[in-house]
Image: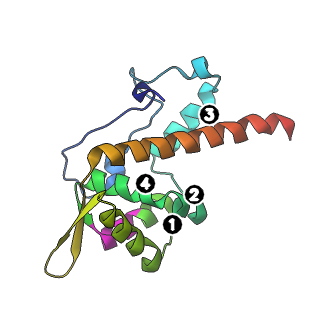
Amino acid sequence: MSGNNLRRVRTDSTTDSTLDRLTPLAAGPDSTASGDHGVPETLLASAAEDVAAGDLDVDDGLVTQSLDEILLALVAMNGGTHGSRLMADLATLFDAQLSPGTVYPRLHDLDADGMLAMHELVQTKEYAVDDTATAADRIEQAAYDHFRAGLFLYASLDSV
């Protein structure tokens, strides 16, 4: 997959909301025209509007499947954060009510794998992306895999 197919947004903002930093993948002059890939403009436009509006409510199981990549993305977007903030972001962005027993072991595994760096503070642990290249590759691959699966499901609607 070409890096030109995804819009990368870098922010040095210290806003309180991750929602403020989300931008649609399908918009802008750098994005590939969807007609070139057989994806209806209306589908991409609708999905882009949902993302821009912060309407990312998805099944908790889907969030859990991609939890490592979502956590990496949230940590990167926040410029470093702690576990309770990540759980709040998961609830706000995805309406995902995941338990600490689901989220914290994944954070510890990402730290052990060298993807995140954990810094112990007085009453909490703060996480930051440590291996940015590997994290970016992993997030991009997960996005691509989900997009392909979504396109397959959308194409199957004609057969139903």
Instruction: Determine whether label 1 and label 2 are within 8 Å by CB.
Output: yes
Q: CA distance from mark 3 to mark 4?
A: 24 Å
Of mark 3 and mark 4, the one earlier in the sequence is 3
Residue type at mark 4? Glu
Between marks 2 and 4, how big is the CA–CA gap? Answer: 15 Å
Cα gap from disc 1 to disc 2, whole angstroms: 8 Å
x then y, percent, for residue 31: 44, 24
Q: Which residue is mark 4?
A: 69
Q: Which residue corresponds to the image point at 50% horizontal and 51% vertical from the top-left? A: 55
**Which mark sits nearer the N-terminus, 1 or 4?**
4
Do the residues bearing badges 3 and 1 touch, measured as CB atoms within 8 Å? no
Does 77 sit left or right of 56 as displayed? left
Q: Which residues, given as a range, are shown in magenta?
A: 82-89
Check disc 4: other Cα within 10 Å, few if <14, some if 14-19, many if 20+.
Answer: many
In this view, the residue farthest toward the top is: 36
Q: Which residue is mark 1?
A: 96
Q: Few, some or many C-alpha atoms within 10 Å of disc 3 (few <14, some 14-19, many ≥20)?
A: some
Which one is earlier in the sequence, the residue at label 3 or at label 1?
Answer: 3
Q: Secondary structure at mark 2?
A: loop
Residue positioned most to the front: 113
- Position in image of residue 119 (x %, y %): 18, 69
Residue 82 in picture, x, y percent from top left: 27, 69
Disc 2 target residue: 58
Circle 1 — which element?
loop
| Quarter of the image that includes the C terminus | top right
